[in-house]
């Protein structure tokens, strides 16, 4: 290779193929450093032949996004990370639906220790409410990829957390929706203590339910919390559940009722 011999430990021939009349010399554990021109010499008795072979090495990139969500009406700092590709020629673009987004920054290319490359593409984007439900994607083009390109997609959405009390039975429902959630946790807390927790993956809606028991004269503070993958803040909604005590009539009301009955009895006797 480029006038250098390959170490014997990295080349091999298949004896079973030799018995069939096929002589192939193989290089094992190919790295990016093996790329180049090779001169193959073949000897068989008095016969000799040689040829020049060009070896091109390729490595397929791994495409990652820093978040699966882009939130409406706020600035989203998006990062598309492309790791371990070779050769260095690569294209990374940000798209929404079928449209390439404007004002894209140049790539940041890095050399890896194994001879491959990595690249970063950043994009600052503020979707509007009308964009909710659509997708953005990082489009990567490289010669090693099937069909020449690969997409990493993220969802534009408006996450919503609601407290839905069912007062007749003193039940509380916490509902998280508005996005496609890769992973989410929804928790219900009563007066600061947790009473229920739900875990959801790859869903459009995540629910957590609990039955809240309130003692006489107690107002219960309910807190719904949602932790969403890709969202760096906790979603919180509060609700006060009024107490329900039907076992007793309040003292003041009982005294008033007794007084009315006594007056009615006195009036009837006078008649």
Image (tube, grey):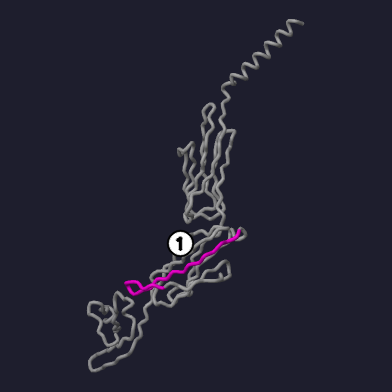
Q: Position of residue 139 (x, y in %)?
A: 50, 70
Q: Which residues are magenta?
A: 109-128
> Most prominent secondary structure in the magenta stretch?
strand
The foreground one among 35 and 174 is 174
Q: Residue at x 56, y 57 (%)?
A: 157
Q: Residue furthest bottom?
A: 46
Quadrant of the frame with the C terminus: top right
> 18 or 123, which lies in front?
123
Report if residue 217 is visible in the image: yes
Q: Is 247 within the magenta?
A: no
Residue 200 visible in the current orientation: no
In the rendered view, does 128 fall on the left or right side of 5?
Answer: right
> Compared to 116, does 231 lie above or below?
above
Q: Would you say residue 115 sits in the magenta stretch?
A: yes
Q: Which residue is rendered at x = 58% and y = 37% of the image?
A: 166
Q: Residue 61 versus residue 193: which sits nearer the camera?
A: 193
Q: Is residue 97 above or below residue 8?
A: above
Mark 1 highlights which residue?
A: 66
Give residue 158's position: percent from left, percent from top.
Answer: 57, 54
Q: Residue at x 48, y 52 (%)?
A: 233
Q: Position of residue 205 (x, y in %)?
A: 54, 50
Q: Is residue 145 above or below residue 196?
A: below
Tell me the element at label 1: loop
Quadrant of the drawing holding the N terminus: bottom left
Answer left or right for 67 relative to 22: right
Give x and y (percent) for residue 31. 32, 76
Q: Residues within 10 Å of mark 1 (few under 14, many from 20)?
A: few
Which residue is found at the position 41% from the left and 73% from the top? 109
């Amino acid at each position: 290779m480029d006038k250098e011999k390959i170490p014997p430990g990295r080349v091999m021939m298949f004896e079973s193929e030799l018995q069939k009349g096929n002589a192939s010399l193989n290089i094992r554990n190919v790295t990016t450093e093996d790329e180049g021109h090779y001169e193959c010499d073949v000897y068989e008795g008095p016969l000799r032949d040689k040829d020049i072979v060009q070896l091109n090495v390729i490595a397929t990139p791994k495409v990652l996004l820093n978040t699966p969500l882009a939130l409406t009406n706020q600035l989203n700092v998006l990062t598309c990370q492309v790791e371990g590709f070779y050769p260095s020629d690569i294209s990374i673009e940000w798209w929404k639906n079928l449209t390439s987004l404007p004002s894209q920054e140049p790539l940041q290319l890095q050399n890896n220790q194994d001879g491959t490359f990595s690249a970063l593409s950043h994009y600052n984007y503020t979707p509007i409410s009308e964009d909710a439900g659509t997708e953005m994607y990082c489009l990567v083009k490289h010669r090693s990829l099937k069909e020449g390109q690969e997409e990493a997609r993220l969802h534009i959405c408006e996450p919503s957390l609601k407290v839905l009390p069912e007062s007749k039975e003193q039940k509380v429902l916490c509902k998280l929706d508005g996005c496609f959630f890769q992973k989410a946790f929804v928790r219900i807390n009563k007066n600061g203590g947790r009473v229920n927790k739900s875990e959801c993956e790859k869903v459009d809606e995540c629910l957590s339910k609990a039955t809240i028991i309130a003692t006489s004269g107690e107002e219960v503070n309910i807190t719904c919390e949602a932790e969403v993958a890709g969202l760096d803040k906790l979603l919180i909604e509060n609700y006060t559940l009024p107490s329900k005590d039907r076992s007793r009539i309040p003292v003041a009301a009982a005294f008033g009722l007794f007084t009315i009955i006594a007056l009615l009895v006195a009036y009837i006797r006078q008649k």
